[in-house]
Amino acid sequence: MTRTPASAMLLMYRRDLVLAFRHWDQIAQPVVFFAMVTTLFPLAISPELGQLRELAGGILWVAALLAALLGLEFLFRADHADGTLEQMMISGQPLALLAIAKGAAHWTACGLPLVLVSPLLAVSLGVPGAALCTVVVSLALGTGILSALGAIGAALTLGLRRGSVLLSLLVLPLAMPALIFGARAIDMAIRGEEAGGPLLLLAAMLVLAMTLAPLAIAAALRISAE
Amino acid sequence: MNWTWLHKFASPPHAYRLAGRLAPWVGWPAFALIVVGLYGGFVLAPPDYQQGEGFRILYVHAPSAWMSMFVYATMAVAAAIGLVWRIKLAHAVAAASAPIGAWFTFAALATGSLWGKPMWGTWWVWDARLTSELILLFLYLGYMALRASIDDRDRADRASAVLAVVGVVNLPVIHYSVFWWNTLHQGATISKIGKPSITGDMLWPLLTMFLAFTLYYGAVMLVRLRAEILRRERDATWLREELRL
Amino acid sequence: MNLGEFLEMGGYAVYVWPSLGLVVFALVWNVFAARRLHATARAEALRRLAAGGRP
């Protein structure tokens, strides 16, 4: 029985989610890391909400970026170790589409929890209620971009010793544009300005990443896994 | 389309010998042009009306910055050629170019800093162009780190090629974002490393330096390429002849 | 303009000369490093040829 690519993607997505949710601790870790890093800033700078509010956009984004990087290493590792990756490559299904499915599952298990927790952390940094919606949208788009770009890094560094540090080095420069606009959107919302511009740019980056990254990911997987 | 001519040209012995013959023809003119350009810029050109003698740093800063980007683009094109047409020589060109480009980037940053200090009072400013250069340096370092971490040469070539292509596609996005970010916090911006208004006798040394640095890159890259070819070569016959010569 | 004035660079000497020096150093270093790399690669290749015939 040959599956259509769409049903293969759906299968991959559900499989990855099931596997991810078997290990609750692995889902919780990036979230806790996010919360802890966010806490570091008041400790390091000042407990004064007025000051934190000025920096909140940047703090939230940097913390989310670092937390999202943590989970990337595991994106392909398990499949590579047990041979599933090879099976994916010879399955006849377009590898780029399977990569999209895996990336989507990864975002659901790693990025989405960060987004869901972000309003709480934002409030702790003095972000006014009216800006919380922008926080959520900004981080949702941002973690999506990061999943896409990060997957490229994960595929390139698959199986390398000290791969996780190298992965961060490779991915961070690519993530800087998203950081600039994402943090800016939050800052604008905090000041009561209309944040549509940066958010749209962020959305555009996400679309660009989702269209182009899978090609790079598939190429990188083939290179790394043979 | 018959590509055999390309593959023949790209064969290691040909490339090795051609690179060896070409390098001095590119290198010595580069040296001469550097001397001429520096003399023109540091001695002949009149001081700038705003920045005085300090603007002369432009003559080393601007060519370095230009080369940092030119080399990255060349590296990415070579990497892409290597990936698509599976030409090992192209990968070797990319590998040979990276350290040179990284040095140019570092030079641009350091001279930018030295230029900024007397003009704007601090050793570093988050000016759009300097920040962009810094991110470019990170891209170079990431590329070289990836190459160094992979033992298998083929995998290293192809993985770093993917990274280079991804990097070059991202470069405009990064550049635009940084530029936009910078204008936010300064209002109407005069770029901090301000271009002095340039007259003719200030311009020709600058253009000379641009050309000189480009030729310089060509020469040094060709030498590094020869080393790369030697390291990669499996077929003993041509090597034996070549090296015993 | 005499030599003293030239070296002074209108007061900017401490910025201009290190900049020039740094770039010249980078240029010289890269040439040196490339040539050394080539020499090492040559020696390696010769050694491998001598040892087993397969480079």
Image (cartoon, rainbow, N blue to C red):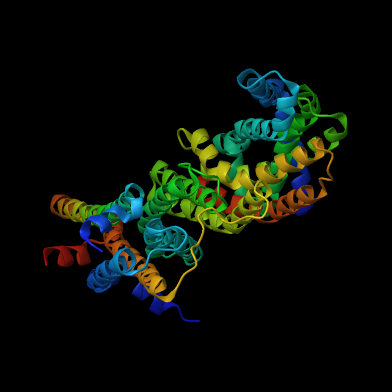
Looking at the picture, tell me which residue is in the foreground, B181 or C43: B181
Q: Find residue C22 and report its horizontal and vertical position in percent.
A: 31, 50
| Side (left or right) of A140 relative to A166 | right
Q: Find residue C25 and report its horizontal and vertical position in percent.
A: 27, 52
Q: Find residue B88 and report its horizontal and vertical position in percent.
A: 39, 62
Q: Residue furthest right?
A: A130
Q: Find residue A38 and report its horizontal and vertical position in percent.
A: 68, 24
Q: Which residue is drawn at 62% across and 37% down?
A: A75
Residue C34 visible in the displayed image: no
Looking at the picture, tell me which residue is in the foreground, A26 or B30: B30
Q: Residue furthest bottom?
A: B1
| Side (left or right) of A118 relative to C45 | right
Q: Answer with the quarter of the image where residue A151 lies.
A: top right
Residue A193 visible in the displayed image: yes
| Side (left or right) of A38 relative to A137 | left
Q: Answer with the quarter of the image where residue B52 lies.
A: bottom left
Q: Residue at x 69, y 32 (%)?
A: A55
Looking at the picture, tell me which residue is in the foreground, C6 or C22: C6
- Compared to residue B209, the image places residue A152 above or below, namely above
Q: How many marks do you count on the picture?
A: 0
